[in-house]
């Protein structure tokens, strides 16, 4: 089955058609815009992270072990999405679906931890409206979380929609750009981890 | 969908669902023209109020709403959409493409813009329009203004998303869809400037998205980024706004530069002088456009070091702009200059824009800027560059491409009356405003006191505004009386670029055969070096077309509805917001799971078209 | 003809300088800061006029010489460009801009220089707080708070600290100095010197709401001795004041009943509205209204504060009895510190 696909489908499946090529390039450009979006949020956060307004600050709240676990989960999910694309390139559709499912599950675990984290902070008196720091923190990290949630919904939709179709010229680019997106939110998280958490505790 | 089915749609349904870049372009033009007229009307009302000192024609509150809506409407809902209309129609034709890269997203971009614009303007009827200026500086906009600002935030957020989508679409179209032989360095300047402007959109609009998001969260959910009492910082808004806002002015002016390059070259019957220098200058302007945003903030207290850096960086933009001006002049030199209406706009542009440009350098002089800032000098400056540059470019482009887009030529005689009246009115309105500013008139004032020496020039300025208004009416009349001048040749101006190689009216599939491009000014090359016809890059065959879709309209309506839920959240209608978002995401979900393979136009049909023409 | 060319920029400047009212126009500078700025404006204008002349000359030459004549159908030579020319019109503008950029950077730093030697220099510090839609001038070294009229001594460096209580405003006295913004949560500073006595018009230049266009103030430059008198009189307490001035007791009572929660006089009263200690010497009422014979402007302003100044946050007093109103007006007009 897998071998047949290798024979009938061209290499670089995601860019084999003009539609696929457009989608691939368009999505890269979209991620360029997303970079500015997050850069604006980072800038805002850096401008406001010292404005505690009498509320709790980064060093009162952040626990590195929790954030470290979250980081590991998300990094692993990036890795599993790479396995998914490797499977796709080998024509192993079942492998693609399986690895994508693992990616989604890891994403959901990450999101669960993030919600837990937020609840914890609110209980420690850092509300969204407590201080400029609070607003900026929840907006930056929350926007990232919303991206993760959207990614989970997107990839889940793809998995269900194409559960029986096999690999085609139409769905290969879709899976490919979804994985691109997933890498992007992973990279953003690495920045959040450094700028928000490490700098928050360290300085 | 089959070809026959695609042909049998009713007209209304056809326009609502179309993904044809040409129809979307025309819709952009129509909607943009409507908002342009609206913004112009708002300007006339303000000029009537300012005609005499201490006038009571308009209450101060209404005046503040008008100045906000005039600026917002002209920038976001008139100038940019009209340029988008021209880009949509012309760019695929100039690069020899049958379509844009993302026809569906292209349609979505238009409908988002339109519903965002309608939402913004509905504020007039529901509790007052936004009143904090188009820049909406906090805390005036966050803590001291009414629901108008909610309309501003959500309206711009929706239409801004449409613009971003449009920008990405143009970028991918230009990179991926060029005809064989159309290398980047053979692209017409209008396409080049569209490319650079789209890049600016891609990197500038997300900053606005975030600015608006923060303002919305602050107003709706009580966030405190800008609230000084909770440690917020009001200057952050200004940075976010101008990181978007300064590139925005280049998003507007670069396409206008592109239009002028086409017009001047065509009507001088000469190849553009210094093509690669022109491309380089366009890129450089786009790049520097991101480095200078804080020159809007010289008086906000950034300190002398930042002020000096941004002053010098801003002055640097004069260099590539100067390169462009001189290259246009030298394109005309040695040419055979035809004074068509389109070219009159280009010729009127050069001196007008130079005057706007030099006041830009004056404004960049940070120490002197403390006198200029937020006065009528600034008002004069940006109207000189936006009307003298962008609006003249739009009108020039309209006269130039009108036969291509609508199949008839606009009347030249009426066009020339329109041009002279508009140009004269424009200078009459804005030239005196330089002096008003230096004589002590701040901008955004609802009136001015008698006895300050400001009366005469304000009166003159208003007369000029009336002239511009009358001129625009002549243009609208021209559109209707010229309809009888059918233009069937497809190449009325002895054009140089690919959009003039196809028959008129433009077939749905643009090019029966994708052309083979052999030089800059591909058509001109074939006319004078070849046999006058484009070489084909492919045999005649069936042409694949995308299906129309109503989903873009539904997605946009969903966001439109949900906005009301957010605006009137205090009345317990947050469910409306959820409903609207459900509609939007539902439509996106349908789009995502439904595969759409389009349809084919059979080769016989294409042969019929060719024979019939 | 050559002579005329040289005269052109000069004539233009004369035309500029003739524009506007002397105490309001940036084109008729009355102090060193405005001078620096006007000099830069002139410098940039000369350079720009040069650019305009060059461009317009080429432009006119080209469109006249190369216009299409009737019957002309020749195809012009398709020139590609000229590298040397490109270099010329890149390099010359850069040189021209350097002539502007260097003095500009120097003056930007000069204008930002608010350092003074506390011991030796002669200076007065004023904290300017902008409110919707009026101005408060605090003199921390004199313990004085004034509203609407900013008194300064001539020939003295005035160090101005700018603050705002609500939204962003901007402090502009065109004849003396360019503007800086009053930003909530941030203190900006600037300086100015007024060599000559006079009343200079000031304006708010940042859109701040409905009353923005009427948010005017005055800078009143007086000789240093008069300024000292003014400042020490402004600092008097109510009791001291009563010893110096015989004030209308009835009017004072009306004031204490109605106005004192927002307006202060001689150190007593609220700070929600302008300090009225020297109200009788105000050049105009509320920043813009002229004094008139029967004091109708003042009475109407007290009764209906938003009628002439829309957006005004002052509470209206439509039903104040006529005799009370008269007494109040008499009292307010008697509030003088310089006599």
Image: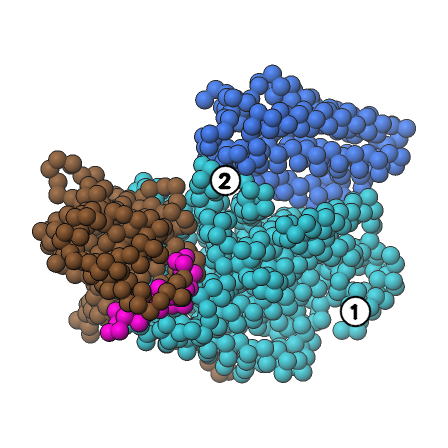
Chain colours: A blue, B cyan, C brown
Residue at the location (27% across, 70% down)?
C295
Residue at the location (72% across, 48% down)?
B575
Q: Nearer the viewer, residue C105 or B434?
A: B434
Mark found first going from the N terminus, 1 or 2: 1
- Is C314 in the magenta? yes
Callout 2: 10 Å neighbours few (<14), some, many (20+)?
many
Percent position of residue B152, x then y: 56, 55
Q: Nearer the viewer, residue C334 or B93?
A: C334
Which label number is shown at residue B225? 2
Percent position of residue B144, x then y: 48, 52
Percent position of residue B508, x then y: 75, 64
- Is B169 in the magenta? no
- Quick check: B462 above or below A57? below
Residue at the location (75% across, 55% down)?
B554
Q: Check disc 1 and report its element: helix, strand or loop.
A: helix
The quadrant the C terminus of chain A occupies is top left
Can residue B33 be seen here? The reply is yes
The quadrant the N terminus of chain A occupies is top right
Q: Nearer the viewer, mark 1 or mark 2?
A: 2
Q: Nearer the viewer, residue B14 or B555?
A: B555
Specify whether B399 is left or right of B367.
Answer: right
Q: Check disc 2 and report its element: helix, strand or loop.
A: loop
- Quick check: B60 above or below B361? below
**Residue range highlighted in magenta:** C290-315
Specify whether C100 is left or right of B499.
Answer: left
**Residue at the disc numbered 1:** B11
Residue at the location (75% across, 28% down)?
A104
Looking at the rendering, which quadrant does residue C127 occupy? top left
Host chain of mark 2? B
- In 3D space, how far apart are the residues under numbered discs 1 and 2 (Cα atoms)? 49 Å
Can residue A74 be seen here? The reply is no
């Amino acid at each position: 089955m897998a071998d047949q696909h290798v024979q009938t489908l061209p290499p670089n499946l995601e860019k084999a058609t003009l539609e696929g090529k457009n989608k691939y390039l368009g999505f890269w450009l979209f991620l360029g815009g997303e970079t500015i979006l997050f850069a604006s949020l980072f800038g805002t956060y850096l401008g406001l992270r010292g404005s505690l307004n009498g509320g709790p600050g980064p060093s009162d709240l952040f626990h590195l072990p929790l954030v470290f676990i979250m980081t590991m989960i998300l990094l692993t999910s990036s890795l599993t999405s790479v396995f998914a694309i490797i499977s796709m390139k080998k024509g192993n559709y079942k492998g693609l679906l399986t690895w994508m499912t693992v990616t989604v599950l890891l994403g959901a675990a990450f999101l669960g931890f993030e919600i837990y984290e937020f609840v914890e902070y609110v209980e420690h008196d850092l509300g969204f409206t407590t201080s400029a720091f609070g607003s900026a923190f929840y907006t930056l990290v929350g926007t990232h979380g919303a991206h993760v949630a959207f990614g989970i919904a997107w990839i889940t939709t793809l998995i269900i929609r194409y559960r029986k179709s096999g690999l085609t010229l139409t769905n290969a680019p879709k899976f490919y750009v979804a994985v691109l997106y997933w890498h992007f939110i992973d990279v953003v998280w690495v920045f959040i981890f450094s700028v928000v958490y490490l700098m928050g505790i360290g300085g | 969908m089959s070809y026959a089915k695609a042909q049998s749609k009713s007209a209304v349904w056809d326009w609502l669902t179309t993904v044809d870049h040409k129809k979307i372009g025309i819709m952009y033009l129509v909607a943009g023209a409507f908002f342009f007229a609206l913004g112009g009307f708002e300007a006339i009302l303000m000029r009537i109020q300012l005609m005499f000192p201490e006038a009571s024609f308009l209450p101060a509150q209404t005046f503040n709403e008008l100045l906000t809506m005039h600026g917002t409407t002209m920038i976001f809902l008139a100038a940019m959409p009209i340029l988008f209309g021209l880009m949509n129609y012309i760019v695929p034709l100039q690069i020899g493409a049958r379509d844009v890269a993302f026809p569906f997203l292209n349609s979505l971009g238009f409908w988002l813009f339109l519903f965002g614009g309608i939402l913004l303007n509905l504020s007039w009827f529901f509790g007052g329009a936004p009143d904090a200026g188009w820049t909406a500086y906090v805390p005036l906009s966050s803590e001291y203004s009414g629901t108008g600002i909610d309309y501003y935030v959500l309206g711009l957020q929706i239409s801004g998303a449409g613009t971003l989508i449009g920008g990405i679409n143009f970028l991918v179209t230009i990179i991926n869809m060029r005809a064989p032989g159309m290398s980047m360095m053979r692209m017409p300047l209008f396409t080049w400037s569209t490319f650079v402007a789209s890049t600016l959109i891609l990197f500038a609009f997300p900053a606005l998205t975030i600015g608006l998001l923060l303002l919305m969260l602050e107003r709706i959910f009580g966030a405190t980024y800008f609230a000084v009492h909770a440690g917020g910082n009001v200057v952050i808004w200004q940075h976010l706004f101008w990181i978007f806002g300064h590139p925005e002015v280049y998003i507007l002016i670069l396409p206008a530069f592109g239009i002028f390059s086409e017009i001047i070259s065509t009507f001088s019957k000469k190849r553009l002088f210094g093509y690669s220098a022109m491309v380089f200058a366009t890129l450089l302007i786009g790049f520097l456009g991101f480095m200078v945003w804080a020159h809007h903030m010289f008086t906000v207290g950034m300190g002398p070091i930042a002020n000096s850096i941004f002053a010098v960086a801003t002055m640097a933009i004069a260099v590539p702009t100067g390169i462009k001006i001189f290259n246009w002049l030298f394109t005309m030199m040695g040419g055979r200059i035809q004074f068509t209406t389109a070219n009159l706009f280009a010729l009127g542009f050069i001196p007008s824009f130079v005057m706007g440009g030099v006041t830009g350098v004056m404004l960049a002089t940070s120490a002197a800027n403390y006198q200029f800032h937020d006065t009528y000098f600034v008002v004069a400056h940006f109207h000189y560059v936006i009307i003298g540059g962008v609006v003249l470019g739009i009108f020039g482009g309209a006269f130039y491409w009108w036969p291509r887009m609508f199949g008839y030529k606009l009347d030249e005689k009426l066009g020339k009356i329109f041009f002279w009246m508009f140009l004269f009115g424009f200078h009459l309105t804005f030239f005196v405003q330089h002096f008003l500013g230096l004589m002590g008139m701040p901008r955004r004032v609802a009136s001015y006191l008698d006895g300050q020496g400001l009366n005469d020039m304000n009166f003159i300025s208003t007369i000029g505004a009336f002239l511009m208004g009358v001129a625009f009416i002549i243009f609208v009349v021209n559109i209707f009386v010229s309809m009888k001048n059918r233009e069937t040749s497809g190449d009325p101006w002895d054009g140089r670029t690919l959009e003039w190689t196809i028959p008129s009216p433009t077939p749905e599939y643009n090019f029966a055969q994708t052309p083979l491009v052999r030089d800059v000014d591909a058509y001109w090359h074939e006319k004078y070096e070849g046999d006058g016809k484009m070489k084909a890059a492919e045999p005649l065959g069936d042409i694949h077309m995308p299906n129309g879709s109503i989903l873009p309209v539904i997605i946009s309506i969903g966001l439109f509805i949900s906005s009301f839920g957010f605006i009137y959240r205090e009345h317990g209608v947050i469910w409306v917001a959820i409903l609207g978002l459900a509609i939007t995401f539902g439509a996106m979900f349908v789009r995502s799971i439904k595969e759409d393979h389009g349809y084919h136009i059979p080769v016989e049909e294409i042969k019929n078209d060719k024979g019939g023409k | 003809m050559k002579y005329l060319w040289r005269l052109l920029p000069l004539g233009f400047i004369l035309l500029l300088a003739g524009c506007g009212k002397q105490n309001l126009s940036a084109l008729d500078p009355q102090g060193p800061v405005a001078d620096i700025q006007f000099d830069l404006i002139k410098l940039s204008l000369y350079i720009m006029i040069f650019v305009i002349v060059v461009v317009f000359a080429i432009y006119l030459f080209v469109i006249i010489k190369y216009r299409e004549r009737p019957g002309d159908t020749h195809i012009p030579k398709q020139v590609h460009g000229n590298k040397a020319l490109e270099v010329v019109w890149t390099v010359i503008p850069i040189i021209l801009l350097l002539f502007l950029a260097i003095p500009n950077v120097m003056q930007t730093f000069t204008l930002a220089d608010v350092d003074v030697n506390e011991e030796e220099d002669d200076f007065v510090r004023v904290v300017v707080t902008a409110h919707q839609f009026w101005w408060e001038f605090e003199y921390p070294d004199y313990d004085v708070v004034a509203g609407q009229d900013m008194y300064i001594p001539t020939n003295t460096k005035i160090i101005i600290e700018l603050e705002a209580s609500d939204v962003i405003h901007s402090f502009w006295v065109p004849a003396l100095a360019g503007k800086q913004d009053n930003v909530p949560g941030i203190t900006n500073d600037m300086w100015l010197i007024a060599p000559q006595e006079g009343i200079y018009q000031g304006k708010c230049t940042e859109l701040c709401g409905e009353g923005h266009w009427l948010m005017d103030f005055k800078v009143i430059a007086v000789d240093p001795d008069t300024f000292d008198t003014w400042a020490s009189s402004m600092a008097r307490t109510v009791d001291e004041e009563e010893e110096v001035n015989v004030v209308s007791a009835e009017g004072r009572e009306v004031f204490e009943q109605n106005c004192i929660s927002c307006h202060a006089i001689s150190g007593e009263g609220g700070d929600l509205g302008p300090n009225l200690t020297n109200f009788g010497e105000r050049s105009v009422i509320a920043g813009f209204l002229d004094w008139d014979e029967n004091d109708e402007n003042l009475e109407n302003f007290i009764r209906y504060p938003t009628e002439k100044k829309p957006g005004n946050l002052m509470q209206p007093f439509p039903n104040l009895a006529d005799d009370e109103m008269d007494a109040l007006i008499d009292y307010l007009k008697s509030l003088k510190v310089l006599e």
